[in-house]
Image (cartoon, rainbow, N blue to C red):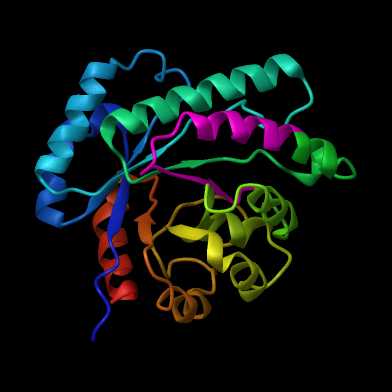
Amino acid sequence: MPRARIPLLVNVPYPSVRSNIERMMALEVGVEVFVSNNLIDEIDLDEAKRVGQELRGRAIPCTLHAPYMDLSPGGVDRKVVEISRDRLKRAIEIANLMEARGIVCHPGYDRWRFGGHEQLWLDNSVETWGQVLKEADKGLLVMVENIFEEEPATLLSLLGHFKDRLWYCFDSGHFNLFSKLPVEEWLVPLKDHLREFHLHDNHGRSDEHLPIGRGSFPFRELRQFLQRLPDIVCVAEIANEEMVIDAIKSARAYLT
């Protein structure tokens, strides 16, 4: 039996979702809704629920991307961590109301701040995500993605505390910028936690968010692994509006 088509989503800022619903329908893509830091307090919760209903009424798959700027879920400063938890909980509330499939968050680890203090970061992170996960509806997948991590050890430690509760989103562009290990040394140990892929490319110098094949990420290696995974979605995560159509075409060809 042939494998079902992997759902393909594109990233869209929350204020632009409604005006792009017809375009999503025409392009046959879902949406990962980005909620920025300063916008999150301004979102009307009743409106968020209606946006979710409109997407479901058109059978448009939906995930959310939580705010991340200035946040530190595993940080040392108690006030910063408190604000980080409040922002993440608010994002979860919006995702619940929209009945999103999942929400992607940044874990906040990098070795320049936490190198040598991994256990401190992990202990604070476990407390944060324990609180955040209590706010999530049963059907909502809460995911963390790789950002500045050079290898997967800290993510594996964090995910190991929340078996079948906290999940993983692999970001190809961030991997290409920061990883010191080959793709398989990330994906093999993390395969049971994987639920989403952010697919974009770069040349290893900046987070360009290019369509697949425009940079140096080893997509051939990833494709063999990706096709063996059940129950995943992929997001063509593009920053430049002019590249959206090319990004969708290249991602769809890649996933076929």
Most extreme residue toward the bottom, as rendered?
A: 1
Quadrant placement of the C terminus: bottom left
Left or right, residue 121 beside residue 68: right
Q: Verify whether residue 175 appears in magenta.
A: no
Residue for point 67% across, 72% down: 185
Q: Nearer the viewer, residue 59 or 218?
A: 59
Quadrant placement of the N terminus: bottom left
Left or right, residue 202 beside residue 146: left
Task: Give the answer, above or below, for where 62 lies relative to 16.
Answer: below
| Total numbered badges shown on the rendered structure | 0
Provide residue 135's location: percent of width, then percent of height.
47, 28
Provide residue 15's location: percent of width, then percent of height.
27, 26
Task: Give the answer, above or below, for where 40 lies relative to 1.
Answer: above
Provide residue 180's location: percent of width, then percent of height.
73, 65
Most extreme residue toward the right, as rendered?
A: 116
Residue for point 54% across, 60% down: 193
Q: Nearer the viewer, residue 91 or 243?
A: 91
Residue for point 62% across, 27% down: 71
Q: Verify whether residue 130 appears in magenta.
A: yes
**Can the viewer see residue 176?**
yes
Q: Which contiguous range is marked in magenta?
A: 124-147
Q: Nearer the viewer, residue 127 or 234?
A: 127
Left or right, residue 1 beside residue 180: left
Provide residue 250's location: percent of width, then percent of height.
31, 68
Q: Nearer the viewer, residue 94 or 149?
A: 94
Which quadrant would residue 85 be assigned to in this image? top right
Task: Give the answer, above or below, for where 48 lies relative to 196.
Answer: above
